[in-house]
Image (tube, grey):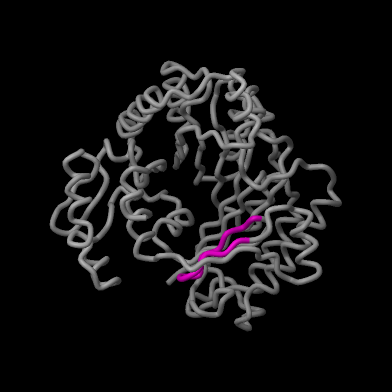
């Protein structure tokens, strides 16, 4: 079983109005350096398997997850955030050195860095590539300058276009775009224009999300006080339908509810979450899964740094999860759905028999389809996926 590594970099130039992630506004390089030091200390202390000195590319070896219960070989690394592309190359190199010293990393590992427009230069991109970063997850969100200003994104559409050209010039041949549908004031024409421009730029991967408004964010307050309109779920659903048709016509394959790729460019790292592969994560608010338990770090950056310095661990949450339940609702996110024989083999239960009444209701509602060996969401079911997932939680 192969595992993934997630590295959380919380710093951003500014905080987006819709963001509910653990992020901090960049204040000084000293603060970032202290964070990188803490992150590297956590990596160093996070794997008691005695693999110090493991050389990258020795695929016959394996490493042990922090709990010591699951053996795995690491074939994906993901720098998430925040805005990891605010790190300078020396900081990325230090983190990568610690990861490579501690774990056996596949020679063909997928190494992704989230990048925002206007946060990189040709020089930094070339340096990231030389350090092994071979995939960029590019936070475009929209090509509408008015919406970008509303979201406090800190860049405009021309920044996105220029940064994408820099990525290509630096040799990034695996680039993912993020786009958001259902933004306040976003019309079908604006959404179609966003899709058309993204498709014309021809990234290898697209992650397309419907806007979620989280309590406590500036956007939630703007909507509550009527400074911004309430999201229109029917309009968002229509945008999703347009997205499915437009991307299919352009040759993108949907492999997960919100994710589309050219053949062979599915996100190997993100797929681990949906298939319940182990992912061990480092940094503030980082969430890990070891095959049985999910556990997470302190969400406050300053407290995280202090805890690593004093206790070498910032973990503040742990739970044993219901694997059978998560196998179903995470597997249903995937276009291929759930292999019924695999479920029976793994859990000793016939899924159809266990949920017969609920499954019949979902079928009658047109939300799922079932054949002899597989259960999956229908096109309509993707729009009402939370209703389907609730049956199995």
Residue drawn 43% across the image and 23% down it: 232
Q: Nearer the viewer, residue 67 or 263?
A: 67
Residue drawn 83% across the image and 42% down it: 27
Query: Please, is residue 244 above or below residue 61 in the view?
Result: above
Q: Where are the magenta residues, as a range?
A: 285-296
Residue 187 position by quadrant: top left
Left or right: 230 in relation to 327:
right
Residue 161 rendering spot, x and y as whole percentages: 58, 28
Left or right: 335 in relation to 154:
left
* Quadrant of the frame with the C terminus: bottom left
Task: Kindly tell me whether residue 157 is visible in this rendering.
Answer: no
Query: Please, is residue 239 above or below residue 127 in the view?
Result: above
Q: Nearer the viewer, residue 171 or 302?
A: 302
Left or right: 40 in relation to 341:
right
Q: As drawn, which residue projects farthest toward the left?
A: 372
- Assess whether residue 331 is covered by the magenta stretch: no
* Quadrant of the frame with the N terminus: bottom left
Residue 50 position by quadrant: bottom right
Residue 140 rendering spot, x and y as whole percentages: 56, 33
Residue 90 rendering spot, x and y as whole percentages: 76, 56
Residue 248 position by quadrant: top left
Task: Kindly tell me whether residue 43 is visible in this rendering.
Answer: yes
Residue 277 rendering spot, x and y as whole percentages: 44, 65
């Amino acid at each position: 079983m192969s595992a993934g590594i997630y590295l959380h970099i919380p710093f951003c130039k500014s905080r987006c109005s819709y963001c509910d992630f653990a992020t901090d506004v960049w204040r000084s390089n000293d603060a970032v350096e202290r964070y990188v030091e803490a992150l590297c200390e956590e990596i160093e202390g996070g794997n008691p398997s005695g693999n110090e000195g493991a050389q990258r590319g020795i695929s016959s070896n394996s490493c042990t997850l922090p709990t010591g219960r699951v053996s795995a070989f690491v074939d994906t690394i993901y720098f998430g955030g925040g805005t990891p592309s605010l790190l300078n190359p020396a900081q990325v190199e230090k983190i990568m050195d610690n990861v490579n010293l501690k774990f056996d990393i596949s020679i063909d590992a997928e190494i992704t860095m989230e990048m925002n427009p206007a946060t990189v230069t040709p020089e930094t991109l070339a340096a990231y590539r030389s350090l092994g970063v071979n995939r960029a997850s590019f936070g475009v969100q929209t090509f509408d300058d008015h919406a970008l200003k509303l979201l406090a994104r800190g860049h405009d559409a021309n920044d996105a276009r220029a940064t994408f050209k820099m990525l290509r010039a630096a040799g990034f041949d695996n680039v993912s775009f993020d786009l958001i549908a259902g933004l306040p004031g976003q019309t079908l024409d604006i959404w179609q224009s966003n899709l058309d421009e993204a498709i014309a730029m021809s990234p290898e991967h697209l992650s397309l999300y419907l806007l979620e408004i989280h309590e406590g964010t500036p956007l939630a307050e703007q909507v509550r006080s009527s400074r911004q309109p309430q999201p229109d779920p029917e309009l968002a659903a229509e945008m999703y339908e347009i997205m499915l048709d437009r991307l299919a016509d352009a040759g993108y394959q949907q492999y997960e509810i919100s994710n589309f790729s050219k053949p062979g460019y599915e996100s190997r790292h993100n797929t681990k979450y949906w298939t319940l592969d182990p992912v061990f994560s480092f940094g503030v608010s980082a969430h890990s899964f070891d095959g049985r338990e999910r556990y997470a770090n302190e969400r406050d950056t300053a407290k995280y740094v202090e805890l690593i310095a004093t206790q070498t661990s910032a973990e503040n949450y742990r739970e044993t999860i219901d694997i059978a339940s998560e196998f179903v609702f995470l597997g249903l996110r995937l276009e291929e759905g759930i292999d019924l024989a695999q479920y029976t083999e793994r859990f000793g239960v016939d899924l159809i028999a266990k949920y017969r009444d609920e499954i019949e209701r979902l079928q009658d509602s047109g939300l799922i389809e079932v054949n002899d060996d597989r259960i999956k969401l229908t096109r309509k079911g993707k729009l009402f996926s939370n209703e389907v997932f609730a049956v199995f939680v």
